[in-house]
């Protein structure tokens, strides 16, 4: 619902603080709360975990998987693994798109008033 409200907010030119708040809400939900597969690399190094997780960036109940995706973001050599872990199915691709779109919307909501004065 917040994503739909964000789209309506940009099209109806709502106040920028409202748009920024909606953008942060959409990004936070997609990154940390939306139900997805874990997607962390298993110990065999070839397969990915299919346990349930919450958020595109978070892992499942296994301690090793909890922060593995965030570590992949920081480590440059793991860029290919990150894309396979974040986007294994269409559902995860859509959720990642929501997270990135919300983040870009939040940045735009902060920059637009600075540029336009």
Image: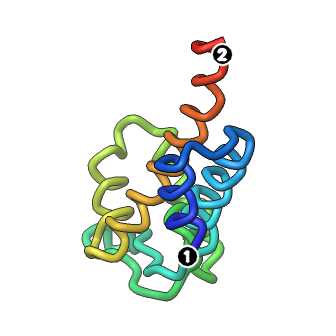
Horizontal side of 94 relative to 22 (left or right) equals: left
At which x and y percent is residue 56?
A: 49, 66
Q: Residue at x 61, y 51 (%)?
A: 23
Q: Is residue 13 above or below residue 83?
A: above
Question: Element under label 1?
Answer: loop
At which x and y percent is residue 66?
A: 61, 68
**According to the image, label 2 marks what residue?**
114
Q: Nearer the viewer, residue 17 or 35?
A: 17
Report the quarter where the N terminus lies.
Answer: bottom right
Horizontal side of 18 relative to 26 (left or right) equals: right
At which x and y percent is residue 5?
A: 57, 63
Front position among marks 2 and 1: 2
Question: Element under label 2?
Answer: helix
Q: Is residue 60 above or below residue 22?
A: below
How dense is the environment of label 2, judged by Cα within 10 Å: few (below 14), some, or many (20 and up)? few
Q: Is residue 9 above or below residue 60?
A: above
Report the quarter where the C terminus lies.
Answer: top right
Q: Residue at x 39, y 74 (%)?
A: 42
**According to the image, label 1 marks what residue?**
34
Q: CA distance from mark 2 to mark 1?
A: 32 Å
Q: Nearer the viewer, residue 116 or 26?
A: 116
Q: Nearer the viewer, residue 91 or 108?
A: 108
Marker disc for residue 16:
none
């Amino acid at each position: 619902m917040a994503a739909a409200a964000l789209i309506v907010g940009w099209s109806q030119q709502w106040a920028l603080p409202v748009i920024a708040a909606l953008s942060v809400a959409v990004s936070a939900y997609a990154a940390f709360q939306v139900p997805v597969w874990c997607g962390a690399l298993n110990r065999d190094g070839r397969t990915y975990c299919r346990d349930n997780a919450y958020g595109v960036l978070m892992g499942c109940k296994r301690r090793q998987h909890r922060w593995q995706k965030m570590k992949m973001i920081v480590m440059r050599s793991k860029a290919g693994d990150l894309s396979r872990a974040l986007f294994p199915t269409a559902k995860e691709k859509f959720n990642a798109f929501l997270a990135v779109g919300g983040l870009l919307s939040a940045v735009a909501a902060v920059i637009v008033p600075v540029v336009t004065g």
